[in-house]
Amino acid sequence: MHPVDWAIIAIYLVWIVWDGLRLTKRSHELEGYFLASRSLPWWAVGLSVMATQLSAITMIGTTGQGYADGMRFLQFYYALPIAMIVLSATLVPFFHKARVYTAYEFLERRFDAKTRAFTSFLFLLSRSMSLGVVISAPAVVLSVVLGISVTSTVLLIALPTAVYTMFGGVQAVTWTDVKQMVLIVFGLVAAVVVLVLGLPDDVSVPQALRIAGTTGRLQTFDFSLDLTNQYTFWSGTIAALFLFCSYFGTDQSQVQRYLAARSIDEARGSLLMSAYWKIPLQALVLLVGVLMFLFYLFTPGPMLFNRVHERELREGPRAAEYQAIERRFEAADAARMAAGVALAEADASGDAGRTVSAEAAFAASDAEVRSVRAAAVALVRSATGDASYNDVNYVFPTFVTTYMPVGLVGLLIAAIVAAAMSSIAAEMASLSTASVIDFYRRFVRREASDRHFLLVSRTATGAWAVLASVVAVRAAELGSLIEVVNRFGSFFYGSILGVFILAVAFPRATGNGAFVGLIAGMGSVAWATFFTSVAFLWHNVIGAVVVVAVGLAVSAVDPGRSRA
């Protein structure tokens, strides 16, 4: 990269850390540190939540998803507005009135200590794994840019963030997120502009998008009833509803945000901000991916976007195989480019018959490119022994560092890294809060000064940072990062949501019923994960339904029912 880009990155990161610490207030008090003394305005909380969502995972994983699959991932978010309305009417007022630090404190008041502890433990397990993926996303970027290992870049990101989180607070994290949101959106818009300007002069944007539509990349509705299909209208409106209700309603990393709002109404306003703006912003991110597909259609791109693996194969014992596949790719890519130009010309001519023929030819050429790329990925997996290798996470970083102009490269890399640091800080804070409030203060030392509990919290933050870094090293090669993090979450979220449904909607449910139901729900999701091909979004439905059904059945015969 150009020295100007390095300077931009360095200046921005130093400023964002300094500004975050400067804005920290009353972090020496437990409520001030964990909940910003419940003083944040709704719009700041809402932007903070959205900045976490539009993090490095979104900018790397989702853009890569858009490049590979197009807009169909947008269906994943169709249930979000419904979920936000449901939560605004149910869990938000419950939590605020209870004056709790964590969502799981509420479960002990409603049920018992064991249900609270088990649910909080599942949160800690799921969030620590997901945090590893959040760290790995910018690590992928820096590994490509700097030419060093993902392990090294993971440590470069995680360690400073852990220190920042230890001395910051939710208030500092929130106001930092507000600034991140501005930079993230600016970076995405800048990428769209560069990609559009990179199209050939004789190919208009509408023509280019019609070409993308030929490959199915503009499809935003799939009404298939196939439960093994990850992204359909039904999984995005039914299965994802359970995921969003659980994530925004029971995950401490999100609950902690709106618990810091000034009032119930302000907490509701922060959730409704996401309801209105998340889908348009997600569409913008996926559009960047689709435009990258079009850009590389008319501009020759690499067969493999991971330069490290490309170099290893080119110089290794299987170089001849790689070169043979590369020759096939160059021919297929050139044929697809010619077919794309022909399709644009046919579309401009207005000849329907010619256009249909050109569409068929382009679809066939695109299928051939996909086939050759699949062969290259298979060779990487065979040569490295990494059966889970996926190239999609390297598409956007490669474009940024190769084709973005000087200055914008630095801004985009800074946006990715700083957004990741903000997300990491928020998630580390929630892990620390649950560790201290739900376990240490509940079972180890009930009475102590705020200073003591904050010291324990900062120690817990460091421990979670180490664990998440270990997960991050592996997560970088698990596939599309945005899909990985949702797979992790879907294993736990449905069952956790089921416990809160029992707590809020069924007054006669008992602690024993909730506890046994939670065990049954996790068992059912484990069975669906390892022994069926049901798409992971439906695991949320399975877990929630089983927890409620088993919980109610056990509660009906529970000797402690009269005391519930």
Image (cartoon, rainbow, N blue to C red):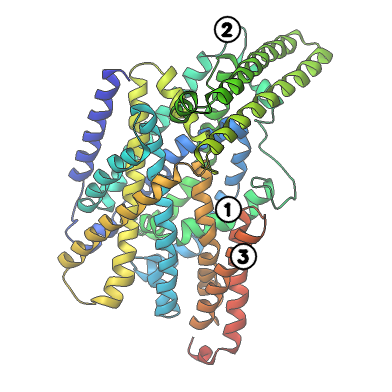
For the view shown, which residue lies furthest in the right direction? 353
Label 3 sits on what residue type? Trp
Which of the marked residues, 1 or 3, is nearer the chain's N terminus? Answer: 1
Badge 3 is on which residue?
527
**Label 1 element class:** helix
Q: In the image, which is nearer the foreground, mark 1 or mark 3?
A: 3
Where is residue 547 drawn, in percent x and y? 58, 72
Q: Is residue 453 above or below residue 128?
A: below
For the view shown, which residue lies furthest in the front direction? 317
Query: Which numbered disc covers residue 82?
Result: 1
**Label 3 element class:** helix
- CA neighbours of label 2 inside 10 A, class few (<14), some (14 to 19), many (20+): few
Give 130 or 430, whichever is nearer the viewer: 130
The answer to whether residue 61 of the structure is visible from this angle is: yes
- CA neighbours of label 1 inside 10 A, class few (<14), some (14 to 19), many (20+): some
Residue at point 53%, 54% (across, down): 244
Where is residue 346 drawn, in percent x and y? 75, 11
Label 1 sits on what residue type? Ile
Badge 2 is on which residue?
201
Q: Is residue 20 above or below residue 259?
A: above
Q: Quadrant of residue 376?
A: top right
Q: In the image, which is nearer the foreground, mark 3 or mark 2?
A: 3
Label 2 sits on what residue type? Asp
Where is residue 435 drawn, in percent x and y? 32, 65
Marks 3/2 in contact by CB < 8 Å: the verdict is no
Which of the marked residues, 2 or 1, is nearer the chain's N terminus? Answer: 1
Q: In the image, which is nearer the foreground, mark 2 or mark 1?
A: 2
